[in-house]
Amino acid sequence: NGTVNITPLPLINAGQDTSVCPGYTITLMAEATSIDPTTIQWTANAPGIFSNPTQLQTSFTPQQNNGQIILTISAHGTSPQCSNKTTSDQLILNIATFPILHAGNDTSICANTNILLLDATEASYQTFNWSSSSGGLFNPYNSDVSSYYINNVDRINGQVSLTLTASGLALCPDHVISDQMSILIDPAPGAFAGADTIICASDSIYLISSQMYQAQSPQWNTIIGSGTFLP
């Protein structure tokens, strides 16, 4: 009776599907049996760098910022009888998304008003919060719809910078980004009519001590009694 030796087919396992932050490096730990180690080859269907694409254990750094990359490892059999047999396996690498932020457009307000923040947008974040260059108060400080209360430091400086800061999702918690908006603060208008005085009922008074600040189009009117202003 003759003996037939059966050579096992080559088998390879790329590993489990996994996820990584954009630009981060992931370690690949493929396993294989009955393969020719000189024929190992890793490939990717999207831009990225393998530290050594001809080894079972290697690393890969994706060069795209979102979506998925399919990583494929292949090899030939190790014996003459199976050298023409190819085995391959794939894993899916999910690219986590970094947070995206927009604090809002620069604007200007009057010094005696507060600002309602309605234009902020954010995505793919775990936490985010507002802060100001003067340490001013937000209500609330961790919402894209918030109010900022102008303080005396802002009024003196004539401007304030508001910063929206966010950290990444669970895979990328150390990735923190921020965006700023600038607010120019126009001084509040003011007026001084002049000191109180007494005149005779038939006399006129020249209003020469009156002043106005950061204002235009002044208009006189009486609160008690009546009279005519010229002009």
Image (spheres, helix red, strand yellow):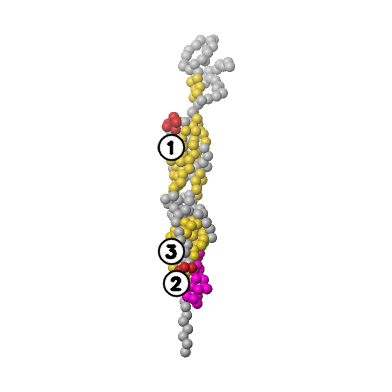
Mark count? 3
Mark 2 or mark 1, which has the lower sequence index?
Answer: 2
Q: Quadrant of residue 228?
A: top right
Q: Is residue 206 above or below residue 121?
A: above
- Residue type at the position of mark 2: Thr
Q: Distance between the residues labelled 1 and 3?
A: 49 Å
Mark 1 or mark 3, which has the lower sequence index?
Answer: 3
Picture coordinates of residue 35, whole percent (x, y): 46, 71
Q: Distance between the residues labelled 2 and 1?
A: 61 Å
Q: How far apart are marks 3 and 2 (CA)?
A: 14 Å
**Magenta region, residue range:** 72-91
Instruction: Please tell me whether mark 2 sits on a helix, a strand or a loop.
Output: strand
Q: Which residue is drawn at 44% across and 61% down?
A: 58
Mark 3 or mark 2, which has the lower sequence index?
Answer: 2
Q: Which residue is drawn at 48% across and 67% down?
A: 40
Please indicate, yes or no, whether residue 15 appears anywhere in the rendered image.
no
Does the residue at mark 3 contact the one at mark 2 (Cβ under 8 Å)?
Answer: no
Viewer-proximal residue among 146 and 157: 157
Does the residue at mark 2 contact the one at mark 1 (Cβ under 8 Å)?
Answer: no
Q: In this view, does 171 lie above or below 221?
A: below
User: What numbered label is drawn on residue 33?
Assistant: 2
Q: Find disc 1 in the rendering and name its residue.
A: 133
Picture coordinates of residue 45, whole percent (x, y): 54, 60
Q: Is residue 227 above or below residue 165?
A: above
Q: Find disc 3 in the rendering and name its residue.
A: 57
Instruction: Please tell me whether mark 1 sits on a helix, a strand or a loop.
Output: loop
Q: Which residue is drawn at 57% across and 16% down?
A: 229
Image quarter where the C terminus lies is: top right
